[in-house]
Image: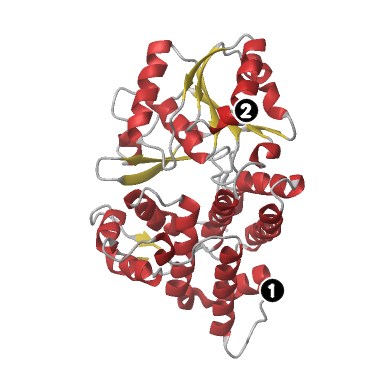
């Protein structure tokens, strides 16, 4: 196990009805004027917007509404948000929605405090040195952005999807009421399940050895998500299932399941080029295609870990004489689960052909400036091979 620093400053308010306390919570932090950031308007249709604004008004909190966040949030909207915050002398940002809204709010919060293009953060040319505080009300169990240090944004110029990590991205507080996810449809619920699993699985398949305790934490989380996911798909108003998914989403991306490990989110990097190129692809759906392909490409290079995964997660029988069969059984079980919750496992299901593979790989290498350090090095050639396995 490697040395590590574990830091989770976000205060969580978890449970039924907690979102109705948002005005009181913000008031107790001493803020008076906030940006209310949200997506395409669903929170107005389902009544959440009214509940939030009433709570803010009762607490004497002034707010400026700013909607319009799309899936795969855009840099252009971030820049508009920065201008609005400066013009209105905003003190903090309240993000109400899923990971796209939360990530957009984080980049706005960092951008307000800098005098350069915030895209420099995503290009790793600059690092935030200050930011507005961000609070969140989570409506989708998926990204883990409510406790994470990461934020991902898409630049429409070139359709580049890039993320950056900073402790300034950690929300001040997050309100997590599983009831708010009851209306999430089966497809988006499935996308969330995959994203939660992947945030842990990317860390689970680390190149670092001797991480038994962290592995066991990860395995428990993944198995809980698998079971809760099946229940939530069948019964969208199963509170305990929704609660398990919401809490697992937070824990999967707050660094707990990667403690002591070298973390390389290689499948996320490959998927960012997919949904960056094809904006209609939901992140979770892209991951459910990419991850099995990566496993098929990589399993022979760390057979023991892939067998461990198959046995501990999917209860596959270990074939001592033919361990490759055990690893392949784990891959098959993963694909089968993704399919059972309505997720694609082939690019053809997303109506995507191989015409952009080379361009996606080129972008993923940052135009020849990097490789992904995995069990074996993944350069442009290997990236194309993995994309081909997605077919």
Q: How far apart are the alpha carbons under marks 1 and 2?
A: 41 Å
Q: Position of residue 378 (x, y in %)?
A: 35, 65
**Residue wearing tag 2:** 48
Residue on which disc 1 sits: 315
Horizontal and vertical percent for residue 351?
38, 61
Q: Is residue 198 left or right of residue 382?
A: right
Q: Residue at x 57, y 50 (%)?
A: 192
The residue shown at (69%, 40%) is 178
In terms of secondary structure, where does tag 2 sit?
Answer: helix
Instruction: Work out whether residue 23 or residue 265 is closer to the camera in this orientation and state it.
Output: 23
Q: Quadrant of residue 94?
A: top right
* Residue drawn 44% across the image and 72% down it: 298
Give the residue at the far front of this rendering: 45
Identify which residue, 268 or 166, lies in the foreground.
Answer: 268
Q: Which mark is residue 43?
A: none
Question: Which quarter of the rendering shows the N terminus?
Answer: bottom right
Which percent across, then down, holds residue 184? 60, 44
Verify CB contact (< 8 Å) between mark 1 and mark 2: no
300 relative to 5, above or below: below
């Amino acid at each position: 196990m490697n040395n590590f620093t574990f830091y989770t400053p976000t205060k969580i308010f978890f449970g039924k009805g907690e979102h109705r306390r948002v005005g009181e919570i913000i008031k107790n932090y001493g803020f008076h004027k906030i940006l209310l950031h949200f997506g395409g308007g669903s929170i107005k249709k389902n009544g959440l917007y009214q509940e939030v604004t009433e709570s803010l008004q009762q607490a004497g909190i002034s707010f400026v509404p700013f909607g319009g966040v799309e899936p795969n949030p855009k840099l252009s909207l971030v820049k508009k948000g920065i201008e609005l915050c400066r013009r209105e002398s905003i003190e903090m940002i309240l993000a109400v929605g899923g990971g796209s809204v939360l990530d957009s709010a984080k980049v706005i919060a960092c951008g307000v405090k800098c005098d350069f293009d915030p895209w420099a953060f995503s290009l790793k040319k600059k690092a935030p040195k200050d930011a507005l505080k961000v609070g969140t009300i989570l409506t989708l169990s998926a990204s883990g952005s409510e406790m994470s240090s990461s934020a991902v944004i898409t630049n429409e110029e070139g359709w580049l999807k890039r993320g950056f990590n900073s402790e300034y991205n950690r929300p001040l507080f997050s309100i997590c009421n599983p009831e708010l996810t009851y209306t999430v449809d089966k497809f988006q619920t499935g996308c969330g399940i995959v994203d939660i699993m992947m945030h842990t699985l990317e860390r689970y398949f680390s190149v670092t050895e001797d991480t038994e305790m962290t592995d066991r934490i990860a395995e428990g989380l993944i198995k809980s998500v698998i079971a809760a996911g099946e229940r939530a798909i069948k019964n969208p108003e199963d509170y305990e299932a929704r609660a398990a998914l919401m809490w697992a989403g937070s824990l999967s991306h707050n660094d707990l399941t990667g403690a002591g490990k070298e973390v390389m989110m290689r499948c996320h990097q490959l998927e960012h080029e997919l949904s960056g190129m094809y904006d209609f692809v939901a992140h979770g759906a892209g991951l459910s295609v990419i991850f099995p392909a990566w496993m098929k490409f990589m399993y022979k290079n760390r057979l023991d870990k892939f067998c461990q995964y198959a046995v501990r997660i999917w209860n596959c029988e270990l074939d001592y004489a033919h361990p490759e069969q055990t690893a392949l059984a784990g891959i098959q079980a993963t694909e089968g689960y993704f399919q059972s919750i309505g997720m694609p496992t082939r690019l053809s299901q997303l109506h995507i052909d191989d015409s952009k593979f080379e361009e996606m790989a080129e972008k993923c290498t940052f135009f020849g400036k990097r490789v992904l350090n995995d069990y074996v090095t993944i350069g442009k050639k290997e990236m194309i091979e993995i994309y081909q396995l997605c077919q």
